[in-house]
Amino acid sequence: YRKAIRTSMGAVLRTPYARMNNWPDDLGALKTGGFTIIALTPRETALGLSACARQSRQRLALLVGSESAGLSAAAEATAGVCVRIPISADVDSLNLATATGIALFHFANH
């Protein structure tokens, strides 16, 4: 959508992303390519986003799941790190686009 590209000042064209046909088996290729695979999850046991973002990483791949089901157990198991965005106990969950934006901001700025 042209207006979205214009509004983002073209950032959507500079942010690398991938779509994998053989999911999640193709994640091994990312690991072989030197990527740290990070799964975004609401699970309480996951590492906090800020703490994870402060650790130095050259190349990372952020996995995000669907709004209702999230990532599959196989995708989370393949990830080297599972991270969560701490939220208020009064909030059930974050919208997927919002959560992804927050995570990308943290990783880009730490």
Image (cartoon, helix red, strand yellow):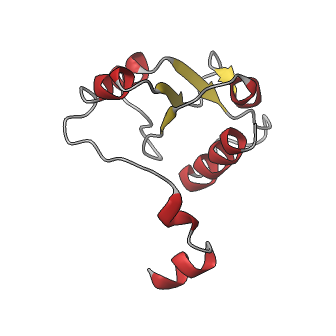
Foreground: 68 or 39? 39
Displayed quadrant of residue 33 = top left
User: In the displayed structure, would residue 16 be above or below residue 84?
Assistant: below
Q: How many labels were placed on the picture? A: 0
Q: State the image coordinates of residue 39 (x, y, percent, origin top left).
A: 50, 29
| Image coords of residue 85 (percent x, y) | 69, 35
Question: In the displayed structure, would residue 97 be above or below residue 20?
Answer: below
Q: Quadrant of residue 26?
A: top left
Residue, x 73% and y 43% (percent of image)?
A: 91
Residue 26 located left or right of residue 78: left
Q: Position of residue 99 (x, y in %)?
A: 62, 47
Observer-nearest of 66 and 82: 82
Q: Residue furthest bottom?
A: 3
Q: Residue at x 48, y 65 (%)?
A: 13
Residue at image location 25% in from the left, 34% down from the top: 23
The answer to whether 41 appears left or right of 65 in the picture is right
Nearer to the camera, 52 or 100? 52
> Which of the image's four quarters has the C terminus?
top right
Q: Measured from the top left, where is residue 107 in percent x and y?
A: 67, 39
Q: Residue at x 69, y 48 (%)?
A: 105
Check the image and report above or below for 17 versus 38.
Answer: below
Q: Nearer the viewer, residue 27 or 42?
A: 27
In which quadrant will I find the N terminus?
A: bottom left
Is residue 43 rendered to the left or right of residue 90?
left
